[in-house]
Image: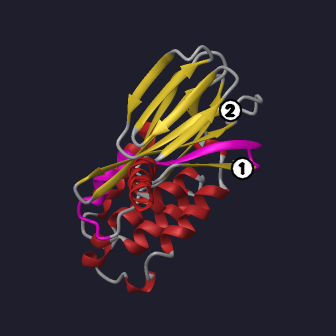
Amino acid sequence: MIKLIYAILFFLFLIFSSDTFSQNKNEFNSDLFKINLVNNLLFVENNDGKEIYKTQFQNPGAFQADLDDDGIDELLVVDKIESGNRIEYSLYIYNLLDTFYLTSEINSGIVEPYETFVGEIEGLIIVSGNPDFSYMNEESEIKALPINCWKFEDGEIFSVNEDLYDIFLTENETLTSLIDIEDVRDCDRSKEIKSLIASVYINSLNAGEKASAVNFLKSFYLCDDFEKVKEELDNLFNKEK
């Protein structure tokens, strides 16, 4: 009889523990809201326990950060979207001050977005990929994107690319470390790393380093369509400014 009771209890333990550990659950709290992220579902309740918001993502992760330094955190959700053998990211920023709502959405392409502190504008910024240049990855062996930098203030997000310098050069150091630059000797190799070359070029333009940007492109994009590619990149860069 005792063995039977132990067996039943062990069976119930397996059921409940399996159900518990199969869920990826995160809870976030603010003064006005209770926020739950369970697997791919985000749902929000007010202090009365009434559900006021619900949405579904593909493979989300969430965290809180005071992006505008007003003493109230925002909720950031990074969704990892898988399509075939490609992974892309989207960032969602939610207001927690008085009303819960989605304030901003950023398509980050293949670059996982993150927030970081920069001294040039003394505060947190969001760094994302620039998906407008994703077409460069179609024939590239190494996939890359230039970055965009964003500032969040008064419930809105806006570009601060023109206000920053160091972060673009640091990003370029990371990109160029992915390849052996001395190995780029012909057009075939240039095409294999076309998106990386383009990303370094655009990052350099964002840093205001036009001369070094052009020199880098000339040195490592060794194809007959150089002028066409440069014009495409310049037109898209200038269109976004």
Q: As shown in the figure, which amino acid type bears the numbered disc 1? A: Val
Which is closer to the viewer, label 2 or label 1? Answer: 2
Q: Position of residue 109 (x, y in %)?
A: 38, 49
Residue located at (72% from left, 28% from top): 72
Q: Quadrant of residue 238?
A: top left
Say whether residue 67 is left or right of residue 86: right
Give the SS element for disc 2. Answer: loop
Q: Earlier in the sequence, mark 2 or mark 1?
A: 2
Determine which residue is flagged by label 2. 73
Q: Position of residue 22 (x, y in %)?
A: 40, 51
Residue located at (70% from left, 32% from top): 68
For the residue pair 67 and 179, the one nearer the viewer reads as 67
Given contact means CB atoms under 8 Å apart, are the residues at marks 2 and 1 in contact?
no
Say whether residue 36 is left or right of residue 57: right
Q: Say whether residue 53 is magenta.
A: no
Query: How is the structure coloured here?
Result: secondary structure
Residue located at (29% from left, 81% from top): 186
Residue 231 in sight? no
Q: As shown in the figure, which amino acid type bears the numbered disc 2? A: Asp
For the residue pair 52 and 98, the one nearer the viewer reads as 52
Residue located at (29% from left, 72% from top): 192
In the image, residue 106 above or below residue 155: below
The segment highlighted magenta reads 119-141
Report the residue that reaches farthest toward the front: 1
Residue 25 in sight? yes
In the image, residue 212 above or below residue 68: below
Q: Which mark is residue 211?
A: none
Q: Position of residue 61 (x, y in %)?
A: 49, 46
Q: Position of residue 157 (x, y in %)?
A: 57, 30
Determine which residue is flagged by label 1. 118
In the image, residue 120 above or below residue 174: above
Say whether residue 126 is left or right of residue 202: right
